[in-house]
Image: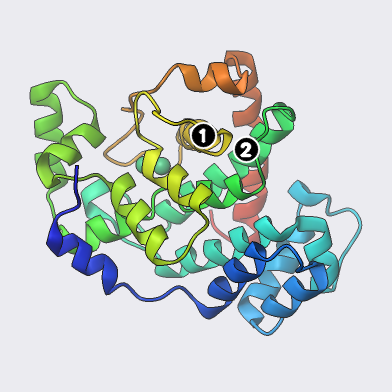
Amino acid sequence: MAIPDGLLHSIASLDPLPITAQKLIKALDDENQGPAQLAQVVEFDPAVTSSVLRIANSAAYGGWNKIDTVRDAVVRLGGAKLLDIVLGDYLKRMKVNAPMYDLAEDDLWLHSAAASLAVKALRQERPRAGIPEIANVAALVHDIGKLVMVRYLKADVKQVLRLRDARGISFVEAEREMFNCDHAEVGGAMATKWGFPPEVVGAITYHHQVPVQAPTPTIDAVIIANLAAKAIGTGLGAEGMDLRLDEQVNRRLGIDFAGFSRVCIQTMVWFKDLKASYGVK
Ligand SMILES: [Fe+2]
Ligand SMILES: [Fe+2]
């Protein structure tokens, strides 16, 4: 399935990523960049610096030992988490109102942030599943395609739902029938334009693919994290829990129902803390 020309044009004219995020993506690509160099990239961005310190001192990252320099925060959090924070702030600022998906205000950001925490919980649950740190970033941006779908295809959610019900298909499948593409594919094209690592582009593009054709631990982790983020009640919108899932995903990650429940509970605990740190109810 190909993205329609008009939509491709919209992707090409998207606002560029904030300069801090662009620099960070480049720096993370270069193995010679240590915590000191990574800290230099972000410490001139006051909004990012305050988020980095707040998160480094949060319960999810061992906040009992207070940190007050960006360099120490980078050592504690790691480079991938740093990008996760920078992109999280960007999404939060976009505060998208997504009528097509029935998501309002902060919903998309909250859902994305919950998915990112769910990957962290998943890695804790399955330390030997080979889930890389960059999977946090992939989870955070897995639904960015919705930003473009909403902005440029001002579709009526009721129409998508009617088609879904008439055909007995999933919300994403109905999206494909109506627009010739879905938000995952569009998100992948956006991530490519922004120069995201291929691992992240793949996870965005295939997070709704059933069965997953070329699975990686990152794609699998993002699929489960999306489900966990929905299970704890974020980003339900029109799509709800109406997802088709490749059952091999949990088998590959070695996660059963009890493990998934633990991931959801851990995500919920960290998510509550994250919301409190941003003053979100
Ligand atoms: Fe999605
Ligand atoms: Fe999602």
Q: Which residue is mark 1?
A: 232
- Evaluate whether residue 190 shows in this view: yes
Residue at mark 1 to residue at mark 2: CA–CA distance = 8 Å
Label 1 or label 2, whichever comes before in sequence order: 1
Q: Is residue 81 left or right of residue 236?
A: right
Residue displayed at 59% across by 75% down: 23
Residue displayed at 45% across by 73% down: 17
What amino acid type is highlighted by mark number 1? Ile
Residue 119, numbered label? none
- Evaluate whether residue 102 shows in this view: no
Residue at the extreme right: 65
Q: Nearer the viewer, residue 131 or 53?
A: 131
Q: Is residue 72 left or right of residue 168?
A: right
Residue displayed at 15% across by 20% down: 168
Q: Measuring from the top left, give residue 117's x and y in whole percent.
A: 61, 44
Q: Measuring from the top left, give residue 44's x and y in whole percent.
A: 68, 85
Is label 1 within 8 A of ligand 2 (CB to nearest ligand atom)? Answer: no
Residue displayed at 49% across by 52% down: 198
Residue 267, numbered label? 2
Circles 1 and 2: CB atoms closer than 8 Å: yes
Q: Measuring from the top left, give residue 236's x and y in whole percent.
A: 37, 38
What amino acid type is highlighted by mark number 2? Thr
